[in-house]
Amino acid sequence: MMHIGPYDDEAGSFDQMKKYIEDNQLEITTLAHREIYITDPRKTEKSKLKTVLRYRVHQKTI
C-alpha cells in the first residue's frame, strides 16, 4: 500500500491493509511488515511523505 502523509499516521493504513487481508481470505506470513521510503523527510512536507507499506501474505488454507 502507498501511504501518503506523516509516519505517525501509518496505523490507519495498516488497519486498512489488515481489513483487506481478512476480507480476501489471506494470512500474514511474517512477523514484521516492511516500509520503503519513497520521499526524503528532510526535503518533503510531512503531509506529502510517501511510504510503501508491505506485508507478506498467502491464501488461507481450508
Image (cartoon, rainbow, N blue to C red):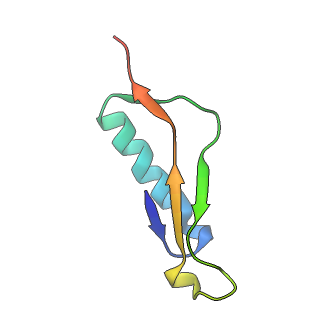
Where is the N terminus found, in terms of image quarters? bottom left
Instruction: Name the outermost residue toward the right.
Output: 42
Instruction: Name the outermost residue toward the top.
Output: 62
Locate residue 39, reporting x and y percent: 58, 76
Q: Residue at position x 34%, y 43% from top?
A: 20
Q: Residue at position x 47%, y 65% from top?
A: 3
Locate residue 41, reporting x and y percent: 66, 80
Is residue 41 toward the left or the right of residue 15 in the image?
A: right
Q: Residue at position x 64%, y 89% from top?
A: 43
Q: Is residue 19 above or below residue 49?
A: above
Quadrant of the rendered image containing residue 58 = top left
Locate residue 17, reporting x and y percent: 42, 48
How many marks on residues?
A: 0
Q: Is residue 22 above or below residue 52?
A: above
Is residue 58 toward the left or the right of residue 36 in the image?
A: left
Q: Is residue 33 above or below residue 6?
A: above
Locate residue 30, reporting x and y percent: 60, 32
Q: Nearer the viewer, residue 52 or 26?
A: 52
Instruction: Name the outermost residue toward the left.
Output: 24
Where is the C terminus found, in terms of image quarters? top left
Q: Is residue 1 above or below residue 22?
A: below
